Image (spheres, rainbow, N blue to C red):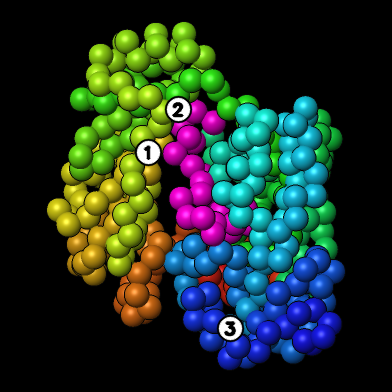
Amino acid sequence: MKSRFGAIPAADISADQAIPPAEIAVAPTTLEEASQALRIATEQRMKVLIWGGGNHQGYGHRVHPDMVLITTSLNRVEVWEPEDLTIVAGAGARISQVEEMLAEKGQTTLLPHRSPTATIGGALAAGLSSYKRFRYGPSRDRVLETKVVTGDGRIVRSGGRVVKNVTGYDIPRLMVGALGRLGLIGSVCLKLIPTPASAVTVTVDDPAAALAALYRPLAVLSTRSGHSAFLWGTQAEVESQASRLGGEVQNGHAWPPRRLRQVAWSLRLPPSRLSEGLGRLPNSWDYVAQQGVGIAECATDQVEIGAATELRGWAESVGGALVLTNGPETLYERIDPWGTPPAGLDYQRKLVAGFDPYRVLNSGRLPGGV
């Protein structure tokens, strides 16, 4: 195994990579090598954990792997067509490095990259979108094509690099948010967005009033410190919209700082119930709430299972959810990270079985242990 596709004995993995213990770790450099690794894993009924930058491993039920498949060598930018606003990149490509390259032509993927080690595959597998979601929609809307390696080693290409060529089942979007259960996202074609010329941040008192006063703002965010509107466009339109708000204007986008805490939750609500949800948060929880989207990222140093259970019960009663996204391993043993499983689990199991018949990839990670 070692000579054929770059396997690394688990004992040799440096501690700073934080990769969980496993019998073996493999770092394929091509999709063919990844395919071979997963065929062997299927034959030997090994449990495989996919690992990119390690930033989103807090999502879902714990996986205790026999093999860790590291994607960081699948990091080539295969094609960049600035005129067509498309890019094809490997799953292990770091978003921060891709964004730096795209900035030369005034373009962006819009993918979230608050960590320098965040990878394209990891962000898409976790179904994450940036704070710019209010204006541009979720990340899955910009996925045009994927090459995926299934649990039993098949390489499946779906979608098309030109929007009009996309036909058949929408497998590329299906992969977004699947946490690797349907396959390893080997490479992806993304639709890019031109970067507008002018950007400002405006302090506002009432986020609902700001949303009502603005036409397609980039975002309106709330924290315990206050509320801000983020504008993006030509200088004339940005100045016009900022003047409607009447608040303090700061050039550029002053995004809330990332707060590293022991425990992190994602509160997901119908947008109209977000303000009520924020009022129900324990005082020890910091948050960044996306107005108009209905998502609040919460962080705390306290393991408050009682408060989380009460908040989850209310969120689910209004059609939302409270999802654990990071915390000590013992917390995952005491509370379901997802909450009440959704309807349609039988359908989801059948879908997963078609891509991973022997439950090799990230097995049990999805809601309901799928």
- Is residue 120 magenta-colored? yes
Residue 147 percent across, percent down from the top left: 78, 55
Q: Earlier in the sequence, mark 2 or mark 1?
A: 2
Q: Residue at x 39, y 8 (%)?
A: 240
- Residue type at numbered disc 2: Leu
Tag nearer the camera, 2 or 1: 1
Residue 102 placement: quadrant: top right
Please say whether residue 316 is visible from this viewpoint: no
Residue on which the image places disc 1: 255
Q: Residue furthest left?
A: 283
Q: Is residue 39 left or right of residue 63?
A: right
328 relative position to 237: left or right: left
Q: Tell me: residue 83, above or below residue 182.
A: above
Q: Residue at x 29, y 15 (%)?
A: 245
Q: Which residue is mark 3?
A: 13
Query: N-terminal of the two: label 3 or label 1?
Result: 3
Q: Residue at x 54, y 34 (%)?
A: 137
Disc 2 versus disc 3: nearer the observer = 3
The image shows residue 59 at horizontal and vertical percentages of 47, 64
**Circle 1: element type:** loop
Q: Is residue 119 above or below residue 221?
A: below
Q: Secondary structure at mark 3?
A: loop
* x and y percentages locating residue 175 in the rendered image: 66, 54
| Residue 327 horizontal side relative to residue 146, left or right | left
Please name the amino acid that badge 1 sits on: Trp
Instruction: Choose top left, top right, bottom left or bottom right for residue 361.
Output: bottom right
- Name the dominant secondary structure of the magenta segment: loop
Tell me, for residue 218, which label it has, or none. 2
Q: Is residue 38 left or right of residue 112?
A: right
